[in-house]
Amino acid sequence: MILGGGMVGDGTGRIFVQDATANGTTGDQVLEVSTAGVMRLVAAPAGAAFCGSSQIARSAGDLFIWNTTTSSILRITETGTTSPFSTVNSVGGSGNCDAFGGDNGVNGLLTRPAGGFFGTSPLRDRVFSLSADGLTVTDLATVAEPQRLAFSPSGRLVVDTNVMAGRFYAIEDDGGITGLFGADAGLPVIYGYRFGADGSIYATAGSSVIRITQGSGAVQELASCFPGGITDVALEPLADGGTGLFALGTDGDSTGGTVGDQIWVLTP
C-alpha cells in the first residue's frame, strides 16, 4: 500500500484516504480509517490512476477526486459506487500525472458552501469554480502553479502554490490575490495543509509537519515523521474530546515496500 496521496475528514472521527498505488493491477484505492485506526476499503476503481498529491473533497456523504484515467472528477459513494462527476473540457488539461506526481489535471478540490466545487489546475495556472451539476466552469483567478485549497476560519478561499517555495494566497471576489504572509520568506514547499481554529496553518513540509502562525508567518516544526515525506494532514476529533492532527506519511518506496505507509496522530 502506498498511501502518499490526499485525505479528508468528516468531522466525526473518520478520515478518507487516497491509496495511490497507480500500478494498474490492484487498482488505486480509497480507504476509510477511523481515528482509532480501524480501516475499511471504500472503493478500488479498476485500473484507475490518481495523482499522488491530489486533494479529496467531500460533499453530501460522497467523495470527489481527480481521476487521471478518465480525465474527470470522480464521484465515490460511501458504499463504493463510482461514476464520473464532471468531464467538462479543459477543467484539468490532459489529466496525466507527471514525474512530480500531480502537476497536471486537477490538484486542489474543495466543496463550495453553495454547492459544487472550487478547483485548481496547476499547469494552467488557474483557480476555478465548478457548478453543482458539474457542467459549468468559471475561472476565478490566475495563480502560478496552484495546489491545494482551504477556507480560513473567516471564510476566505485560500490556495497554496509551490513556485520555488511555499506561498499562500487568498482569492478575492474580484479575482485578485492577496498574500497571507507578505513575501512568505522562509516558508518551505507545502502541499497538504489545514487551518486551525486560531487561524494557524498546519502543513506538510517534506518529512515534517509544521505550524505557520497567523499574521507573522513564523514556522514551527511539530514533528518529523517519515523518510518518504508527509503528503497531507487533517484535524479531527478524538475520543477524549480533544482534536488530533493526523499526518499521512509514506516510506518513499514506490513498489509498496516492506516498511509500510502510515497515518500518524499528533496530540497537544
Image (cartoon, rainbow, N blue to C red):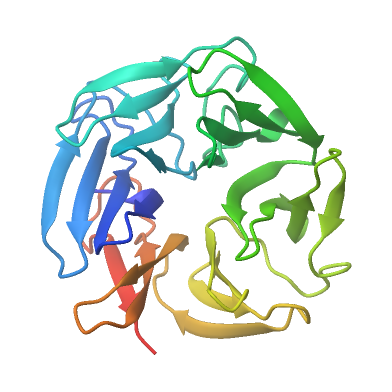
Q: Residue 8 location in percent, x, y?
A: 38, 52
**Residue at left 50%, top 18%?**
134
The residue closer to the viewer here, 209 or 100, is 209
Q: Residue furthest bottom?
A: 268
The residue closer to the viewer here, 219 or 78, is 78
Q: Residue 38 location in percent, x, y?
A: 11, 61
> Which quarter of the picture shows residue 242?
bottom left
Residue 179, above or below 67: below
> Which quarter of the picture shows residue 186?
bottom right
**Residue at left 64%, top 29%?**
129
Q: Is residue 129 left or right of residue 217?
A: left
Q: Is residue 167 left or right of residue 242?
A: right
Q: Residue furthest top?
A: 89
Q: Residue furthest front?
A: 114
Residue 210, above or below 53: below
Residue 82, above or below 62: above
The quadrant the C terminus occupies is bottom left
